[in-house]
Structure formats: structure tokens, C-alpha cells
Amino acid sequence: MRELEIETIATPIGDVVVVCDSGAAAYIDFADNTVRRERLLAQRYGAHALVSGAAARGLGAMVARYFAGELGALDAMPVTLGGTEFQRRVWLALRGIAAGSTSSYGALAARLGLPGAARAVGLANSLNPISLALPCHRVVGADGSLTGYAGGLERKRWLLRHEGALAGEAVQLWS
């Protein structure tokens, strides 16, 4: 059975869970998404146990700094990814969307050299196991509207406001 380190961080929009594998983030999401967490970790690791550990606490401190206003605190967080080659490409491309900016699914697909793959990018985005550090909340609809987010649209709205990308409901698209 694989042992993975876990840490829970209190944030203004709910507790965030960081799961760490060999010093790198393998999963980050809101603590109330336990079904999603167990499904994604089981798909990648099979049988696993979550234990408290120093590496997870270190990554958790990065999450706390982000919520305290240090918006770049997660930019260099080490990550370890499962998924398909395509999913990994999409997830890593999310890091190219800077805090304070957003991108549409179509623009992200075009940046990956796959201009017709907006729906596939959207599906991969929905399976991102490392939210916040791989900022899937920065992806919005082609018209700038807020679209799905595993943590819920209210949290997505809060995160975009926290980063300065949302004033009222007007989202500035980055292409």
C-alpha cells in the first residue's frame, strides 16, 4: 500500500487538502471534495494510506501563503502527475496563465497547438488533481463567463477576485 502525506489548511473559502508523494504535490483540492479525492487518488495509486508528514506541511505552507496574498507562492510548487500524456500537457499549460489573468478553453487548446480541442481541454481541466497550483480556476468560457469548477463557482469567483482577475462579473480574457 502506497503511503501519501496529507495536510489540511484552513482558508477563507474552506479547508484545502494537500496530498504529497515523494515531496511533490499529487493532489490539492477543497476538503469537502472527499469523493473526488478518493476517486482520483485510487485511479492513480490504487490502495493508498494518507499520513501526516513534513513534506505535505511544507506544501501546505505554500497554499497558506497564496491565500494570505502571496499570489506567486504556488508557481514553483513541485508536482507529480498521473493521467494521460494529453491531460498532463493541459494541466502543465495551466501554469502559463498568470495570477490576475484568465484564458478560455479554446485559447488554451490553441496554445497547445490543438485549436479544435476546446472540449477535450475542458474535460482534461475538469480532471486536474492539483487545483490552485495548476490553476484550473483561471479557465473560463469563451465569452468570459464563469464555467464549471470542482470546488464550486462561488469559490472560483472568490479565487479570481483574490487574484484581481474579476471585477464584478467582468472577466478579462488573456489569449
Image (cartoon, rainbow, N blue to C red):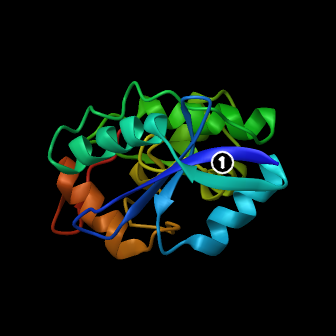
Q: Nearer the viewer, residue 119 or 123?
A: 123
Q: Is residue 66 left or right of residue 151?
A: left
Q: Picture coordinates of residue 173 (x, y %)?
A: 34, 46
Secondary structure beneath dot 1 equals helix
Image spot of residue 149 (x, y percent): 49, 66
Q: Is residue 3 visible?
A: yes
Neighbourhood count class around disc 1 (C-alpha, 10 Å): few under 14, some 14–19, many 20 upward: many
User: Is residue 141 visible in the rendered structure shown here?
Assistant: no
Q: Quadrant of the C terminus?
A: top left
Is residue 2 toward the left or the right of residue 60 in the image?
right
Q: Amino acid at mark 1?
A: Val
User: Image check: 146 left or right of 21?
Assistant: left
Q: Residue at x 61, y 51 (%)?
A: 129
Number of residue marks: 1
Provide residue 40's location: percent of width, then percent of height: 71, 58
Q: Nearer the viewer, residue 99 or 122?
A: 99
* Picture quadrant where residue 170 is located: bottom left
Residue at (62% x, 59% y) in the render: 126
Report the residue at 29% width, 66% height from top: 157
Q: Position of residue 72 (x, y in %)?
A: 26, 32
Q: Quadrant of residue 14?
A: bottom left
**In this orientation, which residue lies closer to the viewer: 161 or 43?**
43
Residue with the mark numbered 1: 121
